[in-house]
Amino acid sequence: MPRPTPLFSLRRTLAVRFSATMFAALLALALWAYLGARHTLMEQLDQSLRGSAQFQVNTLMALPRGREPAELPTDHFVRDVNRFVAVRDSTGRVLGSNSARARDLPLHEVAFEQSRRTGPRLITDEWRGRKFRSIYLAVPSSSGPAAVVQVSASLAPLENSLGIILMQMMATVLLGTLATAVGAGWLAGSAVAPVTEIAEQARAITGAVPGQRITAHVTVSEFHGLTEVVNAMLARLEQASHWHRRIIRDLGHDLRTPVTAMRAGVEVALWHDRSPEDYRRILASTMEEIDRLNLICDALVFLGRLQAGEVKLDLVTMDARLLAREAVAGAQETGGARSIALVQPSEPVPILADTRLMRMILDQLLDNARRYTPPDSRIEVAVRTENEEAVITVEDNGDGVSDEVLPHLFEPFYRSDTARAREGGPGLGLTATAAIISLHGGAVAASRGSEGGLRVEVRLPSVQASLLAGTPGILELAQRSGVASARAVTSG
Amino acid sequence: MRSLVIEDDEKVGGFLEQGLREEKFEVERGRDGDEAVSLALGEHFDVILLDYMLPKRSGPQVAKAIREQDRSTPILMLTARDAPEDIQLCLASGANGYLTKPFRFADLLSHIHRLAAATPSG
């Protein structure tokens, strides 16, 4: 499967986002600082203008009465070269100024009038293409219209200073953002690096060496969960892979036994000229081995379908006695000298089951008992109802299996070196049996029989006789079993 | 030549017995590990054909038990398992050779004759 093309780099994304956040924060901070500095400088300028205007008013107030401001010598005005002072009469006409240029100061009529009525008035105005800050302050007068002192100062020095401050702040913002981008890139890289390392370790795990796990950064709390999940997944995959390898290997071994029997038979047949009876016997034997191979194939296909969830039960209510009777009759035909007995109660043992699969199970158990017991052995099939369950047992008086093997009898191809005799030939037969029983909601168990042989017990949920008429219980059970359909039939 | 065939699969064992008899062998049959040890140590055989997986005792267990008392009778292990560890186990248990199932009957005869020739008659 092709690897998806990475759409973006997490490291770059983190660095960009962090840098953008830092840029916005620095910019806001710089603007706030710039506006604060501008406000402070304007306040200082205004304060200075107020002081100058008040000084000029005080100077005028100190003059002898009747003396016109126009006649004031220059030293009676504010001397600051950065201040332009003009004294205006009540009509706005300039009565006196601290310099020749100051006589041309523009008059802001609104501010001029307001200063006379409501007190000092500060405005920003333009003069000769440049911005100026001006204060209008009325000279207190007890008689007649009051004169007004206008003090103006150019805003150019202040704006130059603010411009420099703004440039420095913008440079700080840009440098700060750049430094943040570099730092964020490094940090994001450090944060993402363990993931890359973990991915590289995971990529190096091919399954060829068992037990390989992710060891990088397992002690880092942020990556512990990730490595734990990946390691657990690796363990599951390894187990599944081991299981599949074992199935393939063991299947090969199991196929060799019937193939060996067939090859030996055919080779012996061809070794010398034989009677038609000999050929018939060898062909019949070969046919049996072909059936054995077929059983392996069927079990394999069935287990494959079971694993893929493709097995759907066709449930019917039936009498387990009938099922056992048919299976025993079939086994008796091929059982040779073996005694195959059926023990059954007089009352029906109703079960809800897939007839074909249940018959397959009983055939498998009987075949297993028949194949691995001596020709004169005894096999007993018993059907009964116990604790509202249908119980079917198949027991023989053969050699049985060891206690070590018993718990593993239903595992696919389970074998110890001495186990084959009771594995059911096709090592999948008992596995398929257990899977089918489980699908029916039942259970299967193996134990040592009363005469030392093998005893396999199948337990199935019993269907009460009242359900035989098709009450909803059947459908409920069918639905619980996940089956496609359920129908009720009467068994003979 | 006296041979002991230990094979739990009736068909394989039966055809081996028939083929060997037709090749003028005297054949004794055993069907599980315990019977194999008992037969091998109770009588003299020129060769023992031993299946790997047997009821009661495995082929290597049988070979080991035989080798504790009989060091000369050639043992040929017949096995469906051919993994290196299985083969190593066969040989380490005292078997003189192994043949992987399914095998050609001619190969079996060839192995038997080679083993018999390599073994001093006792």
Image (tube, coloured by chain):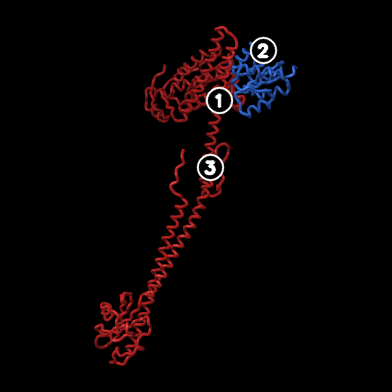
Q: Is the C terminus of chain A in the top left, top right, bottom left or bottom right quadrant?
A: top left
On residue A202, the disc is: 3
Left or right, A26 with respect to A254, comes to left
Is disc 3 in the same subunit as disc 1? Answer: yes
Residue that badge 1 annotates? A252
- SS for callout 1: helix
- Tell me where residue B86 sits by quadrant: top right
Q: Quadrant of residue A135?
A: bottom left
From where the camera sits, is residue A23 visible? yes
* Residue wearing tag 2: B25
Residue type at tag 2? Phe
- Few, some or many C-alpha atoms within 10 Å of disc 1 (few <14, some 14-19, many ≥20)? few
- Judge the density around disc 3: few (<14), some (14-19), many (≥20) Cα neighbours within 10 Å: some
Q: Colour of chain A?
A: red
User: For the point 51% across and 45% down, which residue is it?
Assistant: A226
Could you tell which of marks 3 and 1 lies nearer the N-terminus? Answer: 3
Judging by colour alone, the chain drawn in blue in this rendered image is: B
Across and down, in percent, residue B107 comes to: 63, 18
Please report, as a chain letter, where disc 2 is located.
B
